[in-house]
Image: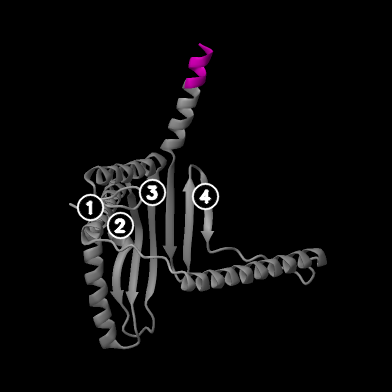
Amino acid sequence: MTALKILACIFIFFAFILSLKAKITVTYNGEVGLFVRVLCFKIKIMPKKEKKKGPFSMSEKKAKKIKDKLQAKAKKKALKKKQKKEQKEQEKLHPKPKQKKSLSDILGIISMVKDLVSKVIKTFFKHLKIDLARCHITVATGDAATTAIAYGAICDASLHLFKLLENVKGFELPEAQDFSIDTDFLGDSTQLDIKISFSLRVWHVFHVAFAALGALISNILKGNFKLGGSHKAK
């Protein structure tokens, strides 16, 4: 019974971890804001708060430590550069024969990459939830004719983007009061006020990873890709 209780607790723990949802929110209103929320915890990534430093905020010991670290980093970089230069000289003196890939090899790799990317994107967008909370764009360039052209281009780009996002599960356009694209023929610069969130659960990430792994195994079985670098011609 004790063993069953332990197994049940482990199962519940992993089920809880896999069900966690991470929500990334991006805002822009003259300044980019980036926030990550997991459960009730909200982490601010951008903008970073600038620490106020007084005239005697850094001790002599700390300043010396930073100086020594920078000097060690510079020496390491110089040594790495020297080793790289010596390696290049050795390669020039003793060049290694290059193995050319055949057309069938290249086509196999292209086919594999295409399958992987297609599978990852399809699975990723199947689970991804996009919430466009607000979007206000006021187009202004300082020139009436340029503003009109820019307004048309932004409207056209927005239309195509929203048609693409409609295929994403759970995506909806914001309410009319939270969405607008206007022009300001007297203004000098375009104003943006956007808030958009992306959310995904932990198990969704594993699903995407397993989908990519499945596509890779499928390509290996088809002969499009072989471990070790050799490829089978079709």
Side of 76 where 173 appears, left or right: left
Q: Residue furthest top?
A: 1
Taking the spot 34% from the left edge, 47% from the top edge, the residue there is 227
| Residue 174: assigned label | 2
Structural distance between the alpha carbons of marks 2 and 4: 23 Å
User: Is residue 153 or residue 178 the one in the foreground?
Assistant: 153
Q: Residue furthest front?
A: 94
Side of 16 where 151 appears, left or right: left
| Residue 121: assigned label | none
Which residue carries the number 3 mark? 199
Structural distance between the alpha carbons of marks 3 and 4: 13 Å
Taking the spot 23% from the left edge, 76% from the top edge, the residue there is 152
First in residue order: circle 2 vs circle 4: 4
Which residue carries the number 4 mark? 42
Report if residue 2 lies within the magenta region: yes
Structural distance between the alpha carbons of marks 3 and 2: 17 Å
| Residue 167: assigned label | 1
Q: Are marks 3 and 1 in contact (CB under 8 Å)?
A: no
First to last magenta residue range: 1-7
First in residue order: circle 1 vs circle 2: 1
Q: Residue furthest right?
A: 60
First in residue order: circle 3 vs circle 1: 1
First in residue order: circle 3 vs circle 4: 4
